[in-house]
Amino acid sequence: MDGWFAEASNWWFLVLAVFIAVSALRVVTSTNVVHAALFLVAALAGTAGLFLVLGAQFVAWVLVLVYIGAVIVLFLFGIMITRAPTGPKVEVDNPHKGFAATAAVLTFAVMVFSSVSAFGDEMVSKVGTGTPTDLIGHQLMSRFVLPFEIVSFVLLAALIGGITLARPDEPPVDEEADEGKTA
C-alpha cells in the first residue's frame, strides 16, 4: 500500500473520486432541481478529470462536450422552458431516508470489499498509446456515417419535440370578437 501513495496520479484519483462522490450525493439529496443539475455537471466534470488522469484525453473531452455541453444544457433549458418549479419542495421528503442511506452504505461497503479483495495491492499498469483521434474521426465519417447521421436526426427530432411540448398553448382566437373590434 506504500507504493500507492508514492504516485501523484493516485492522489489525483483520490481527490477526484471524493469530489465525484460528494457531487453525486448532492445530486440525489438536493431538493432544488437546478442545483441538482449543477451538481451533476460537477460530477461529470470530475469524471472527465479521471479520464484525463488515465490518459484518455479524447474520452474526457467527448464527455465534456456531449454530456456537460449538450445534455445538461438541454436539461436546464427544459427546466426553464417548462417553467417547472425550481425551488425546494417540502413534499419531496421521504420517510424511508434512513433505510435508503443504510442500504446505500452497505452496498458501497460490499463493492469496496469485493474490489479490494479481488485486486489487493495490484497497481494499474502504464497505459500505452491510445487510438489517435484522426482514426476515430475517419471511422466515424466513413464506416459509421449512416448511424452517425441517424443519431443526429433522432437528436434533432427530440429537440423539436421538446420545444413543441414546452411551448405554451395559445388561446383560440375568436374571429367574431375580432371583427367587432375592427368595425
Image: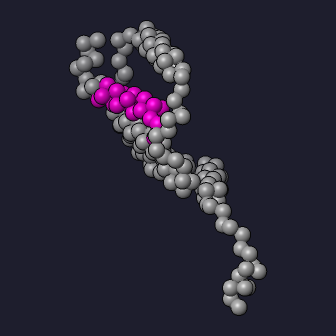
Residue 182 makes an appearance in the image = yes
Q: Quadrant of residue 42?
A: top left
Chain part drawn in magenta:
12-32
Q: Residue at x 37, y 36 (%)?
A: 46
For the N terminus, give its image quadrant: top left
Task: Tell me if residue 132 can be seen.
Answer: no
| Percent coordinates x, y for residue 103 in the rendering | 51, 16
Total numbered circles: 0
Q: Residue at x 73, y 85 (%)?
A: 179
Q: Answer left or right for 48 relative to 81.
A: left
Q: Position of residue 128 (x, y in %)?
A: 38, 31
Looking at the image, which residue sits at the far left?
6
Taking the image as shown, residue 27 lies to the left or right of residue 11, namely: right
Percent position (x, y) of residue 72? 48, 47
Is residue 49 shown in magenta? no
**Residue at 41 percent of width and 36 percent of height:** 43
Q: Which is more toward the observer, 148 or 28?
A: 28
Query: In the image, is residue 23 part of the stretch drawn in magenta?
Result: yes
The structure residue drawn at horizontal position 44% and vertical position 10%, both measured from the top left corner, is: 113
Residue 125 lies, with reference to residue 164, above or below; the image says above
